[in-house]
Amino acid sequence: MSWGTELWDQFDNLEKHTQWGIDVLEKYIKFVKERTEIELSYAKQLRNLSKKYQPKKNSKEEEEYRYTSTRAFLATLNEMNDYAGQHEVISENMTSLITGELTRYVQELKQERKSHFHDGRKAQQHIETCWKQLEASKRRFERDCKEADRAQQYFEKMDADINVTKADVEKARQQAQLRHQMAEDSKAEYSSTLQKFNSEQHDHYYTHVPNIFQKIQEMEERRIVRIGESMKTFAEVDRQVIPIIGKCLDEITKAAESIDHKNDSQLVIEAFKSGFEPPGDIDFEDYTQPMKRTVSESSLSNSRGDGKSEPKFGGKSKGKLWPFIKKNKPPPPPPASASPSAVPNGPQSPKQQKEPLSHRFNEFMTSKPKIHCFRSLKRGLSLKLGAGPEDFSNLPPEQRRKKLQQKVDELNKDIQKEMDQRDALTKMKDVYIKNPQMGDAASVDHRLAELAQNIEKLRLEVQKFEGWLAEVEGRLPMRTEQARRQSGLYEAQNTSAVNSCAQDRESPDGSYTEEQSQETEMKVPATDFDDEFDDEEPLPTIGTCKALYTFEGQNEGTISVAEGEMLYVIEEDKGDGWTRIRRNEDEEGYVPTSYVEVYLDKNAKGAMTYI
């Protein structure tokens, strides 16, 4: 089946059909292009959707993603982002493999079609020219034959007429012979032109036109094959991403299966566990016998003993107060005053830091419970001034431990960054020393010194927070049942300290508040707790120190030292500017850290030198 033989006379129809084929191809290209736009739009919407529900950095939402259910949701968002990426791949592949290729092919197809039909029109024009030449030769032969006949008839007429001269007859005869010769020439020309035309016509319909139409047919068949291959590619592009999309869906299923409700429940405990013990039993109060009413751990109501009202804690929780009061003994406080003027920039004494409450501070310093409430008062004042405590002492023990551990980890990361920069600069300096033309080695000394100072400061911060962390971890072990039962007695023994300093407690809505108590006189019965504190074992020696300046310890808790005197260190600086030292078994107290040069034992935790 060939268009050249079967459709030899359908030149115009073939031209229309091939143009229609190109239009179909262009329509398919437009279809694929719109499909790629849809895929891109869908991928963009999926990415925006995934981004919309991603947790914001440094926000509360980021903390919520420690639960398995929220982590599974985050994994789903990430997989949806990858899922969107596969639709982008579909769009890119369709654009490059189908749209781009077919667009170039259409341009080539149009040029080829134009060339073939140009050859067809040229062949058609040539055969038409040959036909016109044949018609002209034929008409000329017919005309010459008619002219020869008329010339012959005129000669015969002249020859039969006796009145015509012989010269006229001879002229008529010559004219007739000329016309006959012209007719013979026209006949020969017509015969030759006819043969030539028949040959051209045969070549046209059996050679030229079939060849041209065969090329057009092959061109059209290639177009059909090409559009079929593009449709296969259209399907293959989708099929290639199906495994990856399947993996995305498998990962979403895996994330869903990883949800652990028990683990999430445990995380809730870790997130909100305060570390406090439940309140002990309330003691029976027998009003039939004259006795002083005991204040229990779960009852902080007004005392009826001497008719004076007790100061109320937690003003927001009226009638129902939560007994979340810290019972662990904090380290002894720094001295009430010092002489920071002896050394420039010396540490301020606690008395100077708390000048607005000097009369209350002096009262605490002369009372027995001062050791237990000094730091709480200090913390309460810092909260009154609007700054949160640096040691997170306003949080419950367990939450405080987590915050301190997080702070230590952050500081260690900062130290590592600074050390990396220092190592890099050190290598750069070595290169400059070996190759002076590359740079001045002294130019990095200033930066190295800054990094060394930063590292030292960060290490001091780490030691400070590690000290607080060790303090908290030392308080967290579970209390025995006997200790829980004695909690009410412990509260009664420390009521005076509670009423005189800021305490940490939790209201029913879960918030912790610290308020300065009212100044109220209250009698505190003698308890075994004070005796226990007085009989406390002496602290071990952790190093030695040398007094750089003379310090007159005039306030309770301080000790006087002379310049150049050597003493023992029993408690290093906790960040408040005071160091606890001992002269002998009976004399110990606090001195400003800037007044002494400390040499800690290398085996002691956090050993370092203060100058």
Image (tube, rainbow, N blue to C red):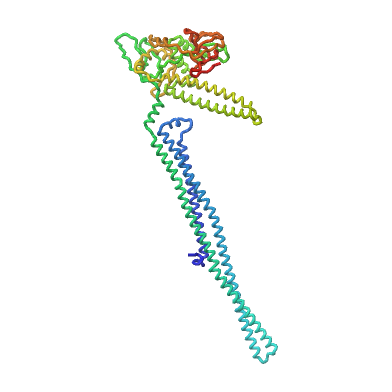
| Residue 472 in view of the camera | yes
Measured from the top left, where is residue 284 in percent x and y?
Answer: 31, 14
Q: Nearer the viewer, residue 512 or 74?
A: 74
Measured from the top left, where is residue 274 in percent x and y?
Answer: 40, 23
- Where 506 sits versus 162, above or below? above
**Residue 450, located in which quarter of the rendered image?**
top right
**Residue 302, located in which quarter of the rendered image?**
top left
Q: Does residue 216 appear left or right of residue 400 in this picture? A: right
Measured from the top left, where is residue 508 in percent x and y?
Answer: 38, 23
Q: Quadrant of the C terminus?
A: top right
- Where 431 sits versus 475, above or below? below
Tag count: 0
Residue at 55%, 23% in the rendered image:
455
- Where 118 sits versus 283, above or below? below
| Residue 336 in view of the camera | no
**Residue 289, located in which quarter of the rendered image?**
top left
Q: Residue furthest front?
A: 434
Residue at 66%, 82% in the rendered image:
178
Q: Residue furthest bottom?
A: 162
